[in-house]
Structure formats: structure tokens, C-alpha cells
Amino acid sequence: MKMYMGLTRRNLLVYFKDKQSIVFSLLTSMIVFALYMLFLKSTFVSAIDDVVSGVPLLKEKIDAADLEMLSSIILLAGIVGSAMITVPYNCLQIVVNDKENNVDRDILATPVKRWQIVLSYFSASGLSAIIMNGIILTTGLVILSINGDLHMGASDLALVYTVVALGCLSSTALFMMIVPFFKTSSACGAFFGILSAVSGFVIGAYIPISQFSDRVQTVCNIFPASHITILLRSALLNGVLKNIDNSIGGVDNGGFVSAIKEIFTVRASMFGRTLEAGEMSIYIIIVFAVSLITMMVLYSKRYKK
């Protein structure tokens, strides 16, 4: 275990000593946040206003500050959801760099076991991703709390951070099956550009997945990152939606909250079937387990060469 811990520590130090890597890990989230504030926030607010305007009585009962917080939380969920894809991938570029610089050959020359090498890459990248995404999430929550009431208790916060940790580990395991196929860091970086552009659409960060056709929704929700983002969005929205529902006082029989959940997707839809939170969690864990097993097989074959 000392060798495993030593390699993990080495991989962590390599990542966090590279200031540019850290900046690029956060860059996508910064860009997405800027795009949201400049162009997309009005789209979300407009969608919520359309729901409210359908029942005039709701305008009198729902606090405008809660509606503003509702849209802001949805935007934050999209930002963190995208970061849970791009940051873990960026953390794993150390695997490609070691291969390109023949550092992996030096590691293989040591008596360390092969499975320890694999797990050290996974552990270091997963932990780095959790730390970076934790910073992004905490920053977002602090900014939102300054501007209004999040209506989140300690249990809600614990659930949110747990979901983020699970999402980072899941993405890391999945990408560990991809990065071995890149021979150079430039090729790895090129794929990162594609990933950054596509990820926001797949998880519904730019446009709610509910607005797509059933087939497109199925394709998007095949990726565990979509389920993670849905769980994160649901956990973040839980408190403010409860507060809004209490403000309405049952006048709409829960219609407003149900409409918001339907529009902004708090449940995944696959093959015409809607999955509950428990089913989504099981799906994520299954994909995570399969990714870990596949990862071990791929790397064991690679290191035998």
C-alpha cells in the first residue's frame, strides 16, 4: 500500500503543481458561466415566467426572489454538471503525458504492482476532480447565498456534495478507458475541445433534455453524466421548490412545482421509461463498476507489453 499511496501522492503533486492545468480545469466552467449570464439566463427565466403567467394567481403568491433563485440554481447545476465531465478528463491527462514522456516505463521498472499503478492514476485524478469541482460548487453556492436564500439545510448540502463526488469518480472511471488510446498530449487536448463543446448539450446544461425527442433523450441519458446532473439539479432545487410550494398554499395542487420538474428534467427518460432517483443511482453505480473492471483489464494488457 505504501507504493500505491506514494504513486497517488506523486500524481496529485504533478497535477496541482501545473498551474496551467488547474486554470484550464476551471476555464470551461468560467466560460459556461459567462455564457449563461450573458445569453442563457433570460431563456430559463422566460420559461419559468411562462409557467407562472398561465395561472395569474400564482404571480401574487410566489416571491419574485424565489423565481430568480430558481433560475440561478438551474444554471449552477448546469455549470457544475459540465465541470464534472471536463475536469476529471483534464485531470487524467497525466496518463497521456507519462506515456508520451516514457515516465510510465520508469514506473514499470519498479517493483510496484500493476494494479497499484492503475488505481493510483484513478485515485489521484478522482480526488483532484472532487477538489476542483468542490471549489466550483462552493463558489457558486456562496455567490447565490449572498444574493438570496437557497433554502438548503445541512442534509441538502451533504447530498449535493455526495452527488458531485460520485459524479467525479464516475467520469474519471469512464475516461480512464478512453485516455489510453491517445498517444500524444496534443491529441488528448483536441478531444478535450470536442468534449467541452458537446458535454453541455448532452447533460441538458444549455437546453433542458425534456425539450428533445424521446430518442434524443434516450441517447443523452445513456451517459451517466446526464443522470448525475439530474440528481444534482434535483438536490439543489429541492429546498426552493418546497418553499415556493408552501407559498402557493396548495392553490394549484402542486401544479407549478410539477411543471418546473417536468420542464427542467429532474428524472431521466430512457427508451420511453421514466427513471426515479433510486433507479438513476443504481444505473450510475453499475456503469461505474463496469468502467472500473474494464479499466483494470485495459491497463493490465497495456502494461504487459
Image (cartoon, helix red, strand yellow):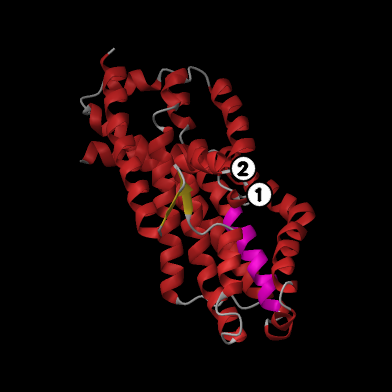
Q: CA distance from mark 1 to mark 2?
A: 7 Å
Circle 1 SS class: loop
- Residue 132 drawn at (x, y percent): 51, 51
Residue 166 in picture, x, y percent from top left: 39, 52
Question: Residue at coordinates 31% horizontally, 43% vertically from top-left?
Answer: 286
Evaluate whether residue 238 shows in this view: yes
Q: Label 1 sits on what residue type?
A: Ile
Q: Is residue 136 above or below residue 23?
A: below
Q: Residue at x 47, y 77 (%)?
A: 153
Identify the amino acid type marked 2.
Answer: Phe
Looking at the image, is 223 positioned above or below residue 40? above
Report whether 100 appears left or right of 244: left
Between 144 and 285, which is closer to the camera in this rendering?
285
**Which badge, 1 or 2, comes first in the chain's sequence?**
2
Give the labeled residue for mark 2: 201
> Measured along the vertical axis of the image, is residue 300 above or below residue 16?
above
User: Where in the figure is residue 72, as x and y percent of width and height?
Assistant: 66, 65
In the drawing, what numbered circle is on residue 132?
Answer: none
Q: Residue furthest top?
A: 305
Where's the C terminus, which quadrant?
top left
| Image-based side of 177 in relation to 195, left or right | left
Residue contact between numbered discs 1 and 2, judged by CB atoms under 8 Å: yes
Q: Assign a secondary structure to mark 2.
A: helix
Instruction: Left or right? Give the position of 194 relative to 16.
Output: right
Q: Which residues are magenta?
A: 65-78
Q: Which residue is mark 1?
A: 207
Does residue 12 appear anywhere in the picture? Answer: no
Tell me the residue at 32%/51% (across/down): 282
Above or below, 140 against 301 in this view is below
Tell me where residue 113 appears, x and y as whole percent.
21, 28
- Mark 1 Cα within 10 Å, few/some/many (few <14, many 20+)? some
Residue at left offset 44%, top offset 44%:
224
